[in-house]
Amino acid sequence: MSFRATVLTLYPEMFPGHLGVSLAGRALERGDWKLDAVHIRDFAPDRHRTVDDTPAGGGAGMVMRADVLAKAIDASSPDGDPRPRLLMSPRGAPLTQAFVRELAGGPGVVIVCGRFEGVDQRVIDGRALREVSVGDYILSGGEPAALTLLDAVVRLLPGVMGNEASGEDESFENGLLEHPHYTRPQDWAGRAIPDVLMSGNHARIAEWRRGEAEKLTRARRPDLLPPKK
């Protein structure tokens, strides 16, 4: 069964975006995964296709209506659909490589892209939407975040990457940032490739890469390291 992604959005023309090119795009053409972009406005009850209203209790901006969004979710993910339902939201749990791998191992995902000031809490609770964040910043909507999540997931699907080992030794896969990389020319602008990488000693190379990864992680992301005892 192919991995199937359904994205609920006010801007379906934003998809597949960059997922339609390179490895993900070729995999999409082959049918290794599927993508449906559902227009939330198609489920609005009025001729103006209204999807939002003023926030209860007052305040700036608008809020996406629970009734309209619930209809879109129910039509796209009926009872019995095993795919998790996500809401891209800055207040969600941070997206991690572990969660990406979990999604890649499943049947697919349903992603709701928020807009305006946010989504009525009742539809989040009533449709069991899991809020996910791609970082501590605010985007104009959930679409770029959904594309980011899908990019991370799709590259891990079987057959998408030419070399399956490419995804096994990257940042966050083993709890560390990735080690530095080098390629030809051997000398560039007075800088040489470290001798150990040219030694042919695979044990020494693996040890060097591990040490460099630990140094980078300690300097840039110490939060990834286990606490000292």
Image (tube, rainbow, N blue to C red):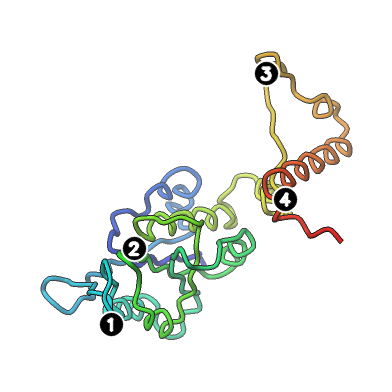
The residue tagged 3 is 185
Which of the labelled discs sits on residue 176, or is there none? Answer: 4
In this view, which residue lies farthest toward the front?
58
**What percent of the width, then of the height, locates residue 213?**
75, 43
Residue that appears at 71% across and 47% down: 169
Tell me the distance, in whole angstroms, between the alpha carbons under discs 4 and 1: 44 Å
Horizontally, is 32 left or right of 168 in the view? left
Kind of residue at disc 1? Asp
Which of the labelled discs sits on residue 50, or is there none? Answer: none
**What percent of the width, then of the height, locates residue 38?**
31, 67
For the residue pair 43 and 136, the one nearer the viewer reads as 136
The residue tagged 1 is 67
Kind of residue at disc 2? Ala
Disc 4 is placed on an element classified as loop
Mark earlier in primary sequence (4, 3): 4
**What percent of the width, then of the height, locates residue 124?**
41, 79
Disc 3 is placed on an element classified as loop
Mark earlier in primary sequence (2, 4): 2
| Quarter occupied by residue 120 | bottom left
Q: Is residue 191 above or below residue 58?
A: above
Mark earlier in primary sequence (4, 1): 1
Mark earlier in primary sequence (2, 1): 2
Q: Nearer the viewer, mark 4 or mark 3?
A: 4
